[in-house]
Structure formats: C-alpha cells, structure tokens
C-alpha cells in the first residue's frame, strides 16, 4: 500500500492543484452513504434521521458524475458506512474511476468486514476516550480496537479520531499511548453542539470546564512536540485550544457533500439543499448561494485543516508533508 501511495502521490498532488486552482472544481465527494447506524450516541444527530438511501446503481451514477467533474477522492461516512452490504462494490467502483477512497466509521463492524475493504485507501475510526468510551458509545472499546488491529494487519492506513468532550479530557494522554502502541495516528477536534440535541446532553458532555479543556489541548501540543503521532497541525491545535476559528472556511471550494438520499448539501452545519439534477449542475447552480450562506466558524478537524491548506498556511502545509512522508516510510 505504501509503495502504491509513494508512486501515486506526485501525480495526485498535481491533479489536486489543477482541480482546485485552475478548474475551480471540488476535490472530494463526501457521501453520507447510508442513514442507518448500529449505535445511538446521544451527541450525534445522524442516527436519528433514518430515511431514504441511494441504490447502488444511483451511487455508481453519482460517482460517474463526480469523476466527470474532476473529483479525486471519495469519502464515505455517516451514519455508519459498514452497515451497507454493497459498500465494497461502491469503493471498488470509485477506485475504477481513479479516485482515492476514504471511510469514517465507528469501528464496531470493522473486524467482521475488514477483508472486504481491499479498495480502501484511508480509514478513520472514531474513538472518543478510553474509560468513558463505553458510556459515550454504548459498546466495549476492546472490540473496536480489535477491528483497528485487523485493519492495520491488512495494510490499511488508519487514524483514530477523538472528539474532545466533557467526559474524556482526563483520558487523552492514555489514548495517545494506545495509538503509539498501535503504531498509527490520532486526530482531535472539539465537540460540536448541534442545535437539534437537547441542552441536557450538552450540560453533561459539553466543554464546560474551559480551564481543564485548555490544559488538555496544551498537553496534546506538548506530546506532539515530543514526537507523538498527532495528526493535527499546531495552527489547528492552538485554534481549538482557544475555541477561536481564526480561518476562512473554504469547504465549499473543496468538498461536495451528498446526503444518503442523494441531495447536494452545503456542509455538516448548514445542511441546505444546493440544487437538483447532476452534480455538475448543482455545483455550478449553487456557486453564488454557497458564498451567501453564513458561516459561524465550526472547528471540525477536516474542514479547518483543509481550509488552512487551501489558504496556503505554511505550518499546516509542512505538517501535512511531514505526516505524508512518515506514511510512505512506515
């Protein structure tokens, strides 16, 4: 896998630059591939929205349209992509079109289905803590770690993503040690308080002790400096420590968001329908609308880091390059 990444990387970087800066087209198709989940985490809105899902043939047409637009990466996530039996076929089809494939999962079904993921290039598993994990997610962490180990043995580049919340701030150093033992990477982001979730949940899980929260992020920064495999840039970590989204969001220049029923949406926060018809029509039709939608400056890891790279922030670009070189050498 790493040899393939090494050989493919220069071409992909050039294609990405051409797509974003010359063609002014989206780089990533972020697809909520299904609406079902095998968990019911109280801080999550997605499992509550079970509804229509695209058929496999519709997904193939979506991928064809994305490829014609120049999209280079297909990211499957929410509610839980491993709940879809035809997921491997969708990943295979995306790969046949020359796209890199990414998946975000809770990891519960990972050990069971890892042998079907030969066409997956990058895996992110949500692990929000250690001792608090079962309380937060309702399942045992050991089973998820077994799935992560199985993915590592299959050679799938794997990252753990941890959402910092009021329950897990005392567990972060331990989580980083687990990640180091696994020989993989960890990323962090602060909990986002969706308006559709009751205030009782945020009273319990929110970042209400800001002093403790900031000390936790400072410790993450220290551990990164000491060599821990923390994926986030220092620029991003300082922003989340201060809860200060000091960047211009470029998500709508980079990512095409498509819901489980095939609607093109603005982003994870302002989930407005951006138009009907083909992806190309929706992308072009919504160009002006995307600029008008108010942005409150969320601190989602992927959104912020991609926006900072798009804005050519030197430290963020260098951080990305360092991590990529380590991926290739590992």
Image: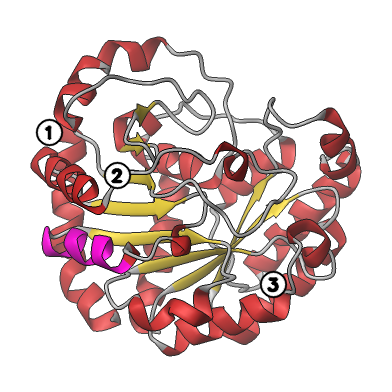
Of the numbered discs 2 and 3, the one sitting upstream in the chain is 2
The extreme bottom residue here reads 153
If the image is split into quadrants, where does the C terminus sit? bottom left
Vertical arrangement, residue 84 with respect to residue 285, above or below = below
- In this view, the residue in front, 117 or 308, is 117
Gap in Å between the C-alphas at discs 3 and 1? 39 Å
Of the numbered discs 3 and 1, the one sitting upstream in the chain is 1
180 horizontally vs 21: left or right: right
Q: How crowded is mark 1: few (under 14 residues within 10 Å), some or many (20 or more)?
A: few
Look at the image and name its color scheme.
Answer: secondary structure
**Residue 24 visible to the viewer:** no
Q: How crowded is mark 2: few (under 14 residues within 10 Å), some or many (20 or more)?
A: many
Residue under label 1: 22
Measured from the top left, where is residue 130 in percent x and y? 78, 70
Mark sitting on residue 176: 3
Q: Quadrant of residue 201?
A: top right
Element carrying mark 2: strand
Residue under label 2: 29
Check whether the beta carbons of the residues at disc 2 and disc 3 lie within 8 A of each other: no
Vertical arrangement, residue 105 with respect to residue 117, above or below = above
Gap in Å between the C-alphas at discs 1 and 2? 18 Å
Residue at horizontal 18%, vertical 34%?
21
231 horizontally vs 311: left or right: right
Stretch in magenta: 88-97
Between circles 2 and 3, the one closer to the viewer is 2
Check whether the beta carbons of the residues at disc 3 and disc 1 lie within 8 A of each other: no
Between circles 1 and 2, the one closer to the viewer is 2
Residue at horizontal 47%, vertical 62%?
83
Element carrying mark 1: helix
**Residue 120 visible to the viewer:** yes
Looking at the magenta stretch, what is its main secondary structure? helix
Q: In which quarter of the image is residue 22?
A: top left
């Amino acid at each position: 896998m790493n040899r393939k990444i090494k050989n493919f990387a220069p071409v992909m970087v050039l294609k990405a630059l051409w797509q974003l800066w010359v063609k002014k087209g989206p780089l990533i198709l972020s697809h909520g591939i299904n609406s079902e989940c095998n968990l019911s985490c109280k801080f999550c809105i997605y499992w509550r929205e079970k509804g229509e899902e695209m058929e496999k043939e519709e997904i193939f047409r979506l991928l064809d349209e994305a490829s014609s637009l120049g999209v280079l990466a297909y990211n499957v996530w929410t509610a839980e992509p491993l709940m879809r039996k035809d997921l491997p076929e969708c990943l295979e089809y995306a790969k046949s079109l020359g796209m890199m494939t990414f998946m975000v999962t809770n990891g519960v079904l990972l050990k069971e289905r890892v042998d079907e993921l030969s066409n997956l290039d990058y895996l992110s598993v949500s692990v929000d803590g250690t001792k608090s994990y079962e309380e937060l997610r309702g399942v045992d962490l050991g089973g998820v770690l077994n799935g992560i180990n199985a993915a590592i043995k299959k050679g799938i580049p794997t990252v753990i993503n941890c959402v910092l919340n009021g329950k897990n701030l005392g567990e972060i150093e331990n989580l980083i040690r687990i990640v180091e033992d696994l020989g993989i990477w960890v990323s962090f982001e602060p909990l986002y308080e969706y308006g559709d979730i009751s205030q009782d949940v945020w009273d319990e899980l929110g970042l209400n002790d800001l002093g403790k929260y900031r000390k936790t992020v400072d410790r993450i920064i220290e551990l990164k400096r000491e060599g821990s495999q923390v994926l986030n840039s220092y620029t991003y970590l300082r922003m989340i420590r201060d809860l200060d989204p000091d960047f211009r969001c470029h998500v709508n220049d980079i990512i095409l968001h498509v819901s489980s029923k095939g609607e093109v949406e603005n982003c994870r926060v302002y989930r407005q329908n951006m138009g009907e018809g083909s992806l190309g029509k929706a992308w072009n039709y919504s160009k002006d609308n995307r600029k008008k939608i108010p942005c409150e400056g969320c601190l989602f890891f992927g959104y912020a880091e991609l926006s900072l790279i798009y804005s050519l922030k030197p430290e963020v670009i260098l951080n990305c390059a360092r991590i990529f070189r380590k991926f290739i050498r590992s």
